[in-house]
Amino acid sequence: MTLQSSTIFIDRLRLKAFHGVMEQERKVGGDFVVSLRVHYNISRAMASDDVADTLNYAALCQLVKEQMATPSHLLEHVAGRIGEAVFRHFPQATALNLAITKLNPPMGADCDGAGVTLHLINEEKEQCGEESFA
């Protein structure tokens, strides 16, 4: 059996946060949804069944909560901070897919949300020439 790709993910983490261009958004706060997929090689955890050999999604969740707790004007800024924190705290991560949605954004339209998505590559892994999978 050959592992071709693998991720760990958190799907639709719901949080209250204080992001927005308008002062009222940063005072009152709003509801946000964060989804992310962290790409890394899980083959060691597949063999060992040991949490020390994986990227712990509870720790990943805590990291996202910490970054979402710091108010920003732009979701792009929040997304960039989350990306930097993921790669700093989880050096085994090779890439990150991230979506942040502001529910009920104050823009005079009826929609389920507005936000940002991004795909980041861990440049340190790329520069080291490390292979993602065996």
Image (cartoon, rainbow, N blue to C red):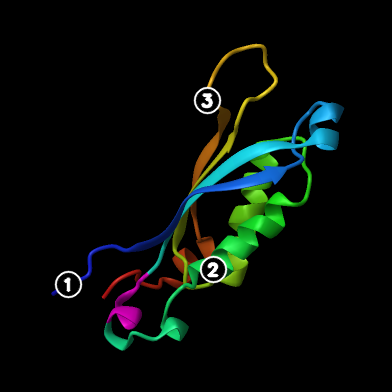
Query: Does the magenta stretch mainly form a helix, a strand or a loop?
Result: helix
**3D distance between C-alphas at marks 3 and 2:** 27 Å
Task: Choose the circle earlier in sequence order: 1 or 2.
Answer: 1
| x and y, in percent, of residue 33 in the image | 56, 42
Task: Choose the circle earlier in sequence order: 3 or 2.
Answer: 2
Q: Residue at x 29, y 79 (%)?
A: 46
The reply to whether callout 1 and callout 3 are in contact (CB within 8 Å) is no
Residue under label 2, please give it: 58
Label 3 element class: loop
Q: Is residue 34 magenta?
A: no
Q: Which residues are magenta?
A: 41-46
Q: Nearer the viewer, residue 63 or 86?
A: 63
Label 1 or label 2, whichever lies nearer to me, is 2
Label placed on residue 2: 1
In the displayed image of the protein, which residue is found farthest to the left? 1
Say above or below: 61 vs 59.
above
Task: Choose the circle earlier in sequence order: 1 or 3.
Answer: 1
> Where is residue 132, by image quadrant?
bottom left
Q: Residue at x 64, y 47 (%)?
A: 15
Label 1 or label 3, whichever lies nearer to me, is 3
Which amino acid, mark 1? Thr
Label 2: how many Cα within 10 Å (few below 14, some 14–19, many 20+)? few
Label placed on residue 112: 3
Q: Residue at x 43, y 77 (%)?
A: 54
Which amino acid, mark 3? Asp
Check the picture and name the quadrant holding the C terminus. Answer: bottom left
Q: Is residue 70 left or right of residue 87?
A: right
Check the picture and name the quadrant holding the N terminus. Answer: bottom left
Label 1 element class: loop
| x and y, in percent, of residue 9 in the image | 43, 58
**3D distance between C-alphas at marks 1 and 2:** 27 Å
